[in-house]
Amino acid sequence: MTSEVQRRPAAAVVSRNSLWSRIYGLGSVFGKTMRDSRRATLVVGGVIGLLLIGVSKAIVSEFNTVESRKTLEAVILSVPPILQGLAGRVVHVDTLGGYLTYKYGNFLPEITGLWSILALSGTLAAEARRGSLEFVAATAMTRRRIAIEKLGGHLVSVTIASVIVFVSVLIVSSFATLPGDAIPLDAAVGFTLWLALTGLIAGAVAFATAQFVGRGSAVGVAGAIMFGGLIVNGYQAPIPELKPLANLTWFGWTANHIPLAGMFDWPSVVLVAVVAIALFVVGIEAFARRDVGAVSAIPTPSMPGPLAGTRGPIGRTIGNNLPGAIAWGLGIGLFGLMIAGSGHSFLDQLNKSPEFIDLLNKAFPGVNIATVGGFLQLLFVEFGFILAGLAAATLVAGWASDETSGRLEMLLATPLARRRWVMAGAIGMFVGLVVFEVLAGGGIALGVAVAGGELVTPLVGSLSLGLFAFAMVGVGVAVAGVFGSGFAGPTVALVAVVTWFINIIAPALQLPDWIHQLALTAHYGLPMLGQWDVPGIVASIVIGVGGVAIGAIGMQRRDLRG
């Protein structure tokens, strides 16, 4: 009689992720979010920090006496209120902190806001559309925890960037040479918190909205509120009609919080934080309670088959991108309507300052800037360009999702050639831009009609938005063809933001002219006043058409990427 001795099966080895991997790496949803946002964190914090340090150094060097500061303050106070607009409130501008806030403070929340909008609009919605979140949601991890860890990763990233900004403000304070230039610790804290929270609340709007209408429309809604809020808040004093609108945005709430100038309004900062938290909760709960990736498109009339995306790649691109094009067009159109409609108040204020009209005539010889079109040129165009660029980024990302989601592999298994897919997608995006332009131009035209201004010139001038978006689509298609579709949308958004940043900062900092010329929008002339620069038009067309050609060629020479 024999017996067999059976060896006990070895216990399963359970590998555990290290603490470092969970915090920064692939060991958790939070860690992956931190890893994915590492470059953006350093870029945003570094850019704002270097900007504060560089500008402050220039201010201290150029205005290094009490007399020069008093002269600077007198010049600023002499500017008519209607032209102070996008600058900050005139509070202690004879000090370093006061002038820094007045000159550049209002633009910094646009940088942090854009970062948060682009990050939080897609952190759940974009991954849900690609299908990657379905695998994570199939694990024991709850949806609520996934959303919280995704959001927590961005909050920590913003905190790291804010620490960089805070250190930069302390460095700026060390430049103090005159009375009042030193920035107290509480002022540095107040400024940093304000900057972080005003950026986060813009992202919170996109985060909550994206769970219902998708990433593209959410970016449009949040971007329009952010840029529109900056403008209506800046002009609420000289144009009383804008005050109710300004009080609906965080710029209006925190108008009296100017810590670098010694003014504090902590309740308004708390209000921004409370509203941001509420929006984050809405976004988390919506993600937890709705089907993954389920969104409600903006209602549109029923479309025939060719436009519904059922008859070829062109129709597919048009059908997929039409809701986003409509959302962006309506958003920018309403923005233009609001600005153009207040043009009569601008003219009334301007007519009270003949000296400033003479100054404008010298700055723009041969151009009647004292018109509704002139008001749009001064106030609307720059922000219209960046919104048009972000609209193009949305359309490009929608088209590129064919490859990033894996659908393109099935499409190319049919007789569809790669070059045709690229060309058809580009045509579909250009059709979306036509829809976008019609809606945006219609809003501007209606606003001009309400203000009683000349209609044709601003309406034709609004085509500059479409031209810029056309060029940005070309950039996106070229990047998608050569480097991969996953890089296309973010690259277009980055180019649009950098273009806007150069066009604003280069003249303000008196940088070399060649730096300013790098911005495509610097070559359009004064379109809202009927003065076009031909090189800008030609460059936009060449970039758009050439980008599509490059993308088509590049697509034939590389492997598909997920």
Image (cartoon, rainbow, N blue to C red):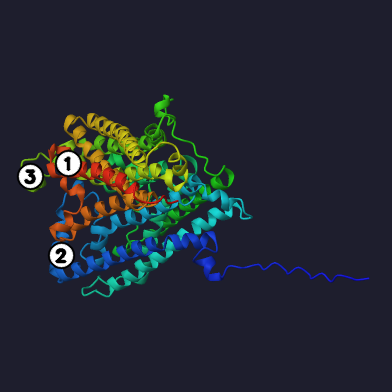
Question: Looking at this view, is 198 or 300 the one in front?
Answer: 300
Question: Looking at this view, is 233 or 151 the one in front?
Answer: 151
Residue annotated with mark 3: 361
Residue annotated with mark 2: 70
Looking at the picture, does residue 22 appear above or below residue 370? Answer: below
Question: Looking at this view, is 547 or 19 the one in front?
Answer: 547
Label 2 and label 3: CA atoms lie apart by 27 Å
Does dot 1 land on a helix, a strand or a loop?
helix
Residue under the point 37% across and 44% down: 394
Label 1 and label 2: CA atoms lie apart by 44 Å
**Is any atom of residue 176 visible in this view?**
yes
Does dot 2 land on a helix, a strand or a loop?
helix
Quadrant housing the N terminus? bottom right
Q: What amino acid type is highlighted by mark number 3?
A: Asn
Residue annotated with mark 1: 537
Q: What amino acid type is highlighted by mark number 2?
A: Lys
Looking at the picture, does residue 179 appear above or below residue 347? Answer: below
Check whether the beta carbons of the residues at disc 2 and disc 3 lie within 8 A of each other: no
Q: Nearer the viewer, mark 1 or mark 2?
A: 1
Q: Position of residue 61 (x, y in %)?
A: 16, 71
> Looking at the image, is mark 3 or mark 1 earlier in the sequence?
3
Residue under the point 6% across and 47% down: 362
Question: In the figure, is residue 14 to the left or right of 284?
Answer: right
Q: What amino acid type is highlighted by mark number 1?
A: Ile
Circle 1 packing at 10 Å, graded few (<14), some (14-19), many (20+), is: some
Q: Nearer the viewer, mark 3 or mark 1?
A: 1
Q: Position of residue 444 (x, y in %)?
A: 26, 34
> Looking at the image, is mark 2 or mark 3 earlier in the sequence?
2
